[in-house]
């Protein structure tokens, strides 16, 4: 397997505009994510940017970036466009899609996602999950829950469903973390599919793949990485960088 790590980023985030360039301890957030991805050693790393300002910030830090159409509808469409621009000959047979709002993501998380594709030949799309941070996660629609076929003690399992709805019972609740690993042919197939009924209902893009019969598998993390989605999250990230 010969993966490449791509980080989609655009300036027009609804809850936190311009967040890829948000300063965290003197470093733009997108550059922090880039450095963590490089440290994972999973493959070459590049930013799939929706705006020229992001390209310039990444290049100023010595990183690699490619400008993509700002009107692309999703991060998966953006990484496909970047992949085709950076690797038209198809040397990379897998793509890790790392979100650009995880400035302190442990490099081991990226490696774990790539490891699922390596370990599970039947897996089309890999992702990661983490335990719930509190019982309140179960009823929080902003916390996406993954339902896994996970044998006791296993660290990888097949995803059966993803939902924003409340899950009940004594079994662990797995929070889905938005990091994906695609086999190249799976990424192409996924981006050519129309949005599915369950995807539209739950507003969760990954359900498109499940409805199309693709196998999604998840690696289990010990804890979720910090994600910056709001001004309050940004302040917490800045405090953590001090």
Image: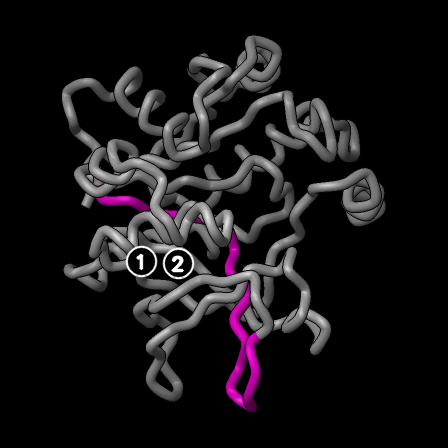
What's the magenta region? 167-183
Is residue 133 rendered to the left or right of residue 95? right
Q: Quadrant of residue 161?
A: bottom left
What residue sits right under mark 1 in the picture?
115
Q: Residue visible at 50% across and 53% down?
A: 202
Picture layout, residue 156 above or below residue 20 = below
For label 2, count other residues whose C-alpha is less than 10 Å away and answer few (under 14), some (14-19) or many (20+): many
Element under label 1?
A: helix
Residue 92, percent across and down? Answer: 21, 33
For label 1, count other residues whose C-alpha is less than 10 Å away and answer few (under 14), some (14-19) or many (20+): some
- Is residue 50 highlighted in magenta? no
Q: Residue visible at 69% across and 43% down?
A: 228
Q: Is residue 3 visible?
A: no
Element under label 2?
A: helix
Residues at circles 1 and 2 in contact by the CB criterion of under 8 Å = yes
In the depicted view, which residue is nearer to us: 17 or 242? 17
């Amino acid at each position: 397997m010969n993966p490449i790590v791509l980080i989609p980023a655009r300036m027009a985030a609804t809850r936190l505009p311009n967040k890829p360039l948000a300063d965290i301890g003197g470093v733009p957030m997108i550059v922090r994510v880039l450095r963590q991805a490089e440290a994972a050693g999973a493959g070459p790393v590049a930013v799939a940017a929706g705006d020229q300002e992001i390209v310039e910030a990444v290049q100023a830090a010595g990183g690699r970036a490619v400008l993509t159409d700002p009107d692309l509808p999703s991060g998966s469409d953006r990484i496909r466009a970047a992949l085709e621009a950076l690797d038209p000959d198809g040397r990379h047979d897998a793509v890790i899609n790392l979100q650009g709002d995880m400035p302190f993501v442990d490099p081991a998380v990226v490696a774990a996602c790539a490891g699922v594709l390596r370990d599970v030949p039947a897996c089309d799309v890999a992702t990661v999950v983490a335990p719930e941070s509190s019982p309140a996660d179960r009823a929080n629609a902003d916390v996406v829950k993954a339902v896994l076929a996970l044998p006791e003690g296993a660290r990888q399992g097949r995803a059966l469903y993803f939902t924003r709805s409340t899950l009940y019972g004594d079994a662990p609740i797995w929070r889905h973390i938005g990091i994906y690993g695609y086999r190249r042919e799976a990424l192409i197939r996924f981006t050519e599919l129309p949005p599915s009924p369950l995807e539209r209902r739950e507003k969760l893009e990954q359900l498109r793949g499940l409805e199309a019969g693709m196998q999604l598998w998840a690696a289990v993390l010990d804890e979720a990485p910090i994600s910056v989605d709001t001004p309050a999250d940004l302040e917490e990230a800045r405090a953590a960088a001090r």
